[in-house]
Amino acid sequence: MYNLLTGPALWATFIIFWGGLVLRIVWLFRLSRKKDPVFYNHASFAWGFKSILYWMVPWGSASMRLQPVFTFMVFTFHFTLLAVPLFLNAHSILWDEAFGISLWSMPDLWADIMSVILLVSVAFLIIRRIVRSEVRILTGAWDHILLALAALPFLTGFLAYHQFGPYEPMMTAHVITGELLLILIPFTKLSHMILFFFTRAFIGFEMGGRRGARSW
């Protein structure tokens, strides 16, 4: 089972992940050209770049500065979500074996700390969706499921590495949840990992290129 998941299933996962992202970007681009062609009349690399940049820097926008704790937790969540899968030592070995890509590897202690931090940030985001009325009314069950699913590869990987519970079932769960997360990204709100850049650029075009106003 494990060999299947780390072999053919892993390749299928990457094909669906990258293929799905490319298809969605192409579809949305064509849709925008059809329904909102006016955006492209104000396309400005400078305004688009600044819009992206200010929203990628912690507390770079006015709305982020109004919610400093939430901003800190969101950036913590995204940083650890990307850093651990990319630079975990065990994953670096897999990258090298599968694709011949040699990445820097973080110490296992760092990965442990980041995994715990991610789990804490997920708990914070879920609790916030429950207790803040203005967020709760916009939250559906699927939003909670996606957050939980983002946490599961880290939780199962942490438990497997420290051998809490049966190792093989825990590692199998780790691989399955990780692959499921990648498969869902192109077809759910998680696609904002790529679409964020297009959205912020378009808002920069609209606010800056058309109105001469900042979007951050």
Image (cartoon, grey):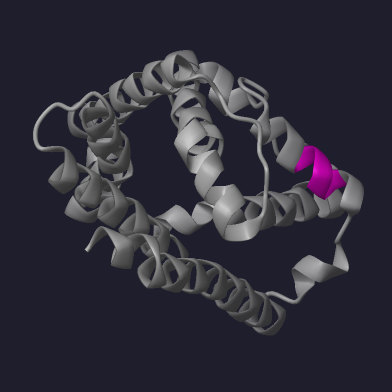
Residue 14 vertical position relative to residue 79 in the rendered view, above or below: below
The residue lying at 36 percent from left, 58 percent from top is 179
- Does the segment drawn in magenta span residue 140? no
131 lies above or below 192: above
Majority secondary structure in the magenta region: helix
Q: Is residue 146 visible?
A: yes
Depth order, front residue of 30/42: 30
The N terminus sits in image quarter: bottom left
81 above or below 197? above
Q: Quadrant of the C terminus?
A: top right
Q: Is residue 138 visible?
A: no
- What residue lies at 79% left-to-right and 54% top-to-bottom? 205
Horizontal relation, residue 209 to residue 186: left or right:
right
Residue 189 is drawn in which quadrant?
bottom left
Left or right: 65 in relation to 155: right
Give, as a single range, the part of the protein colored magenta: 47-51
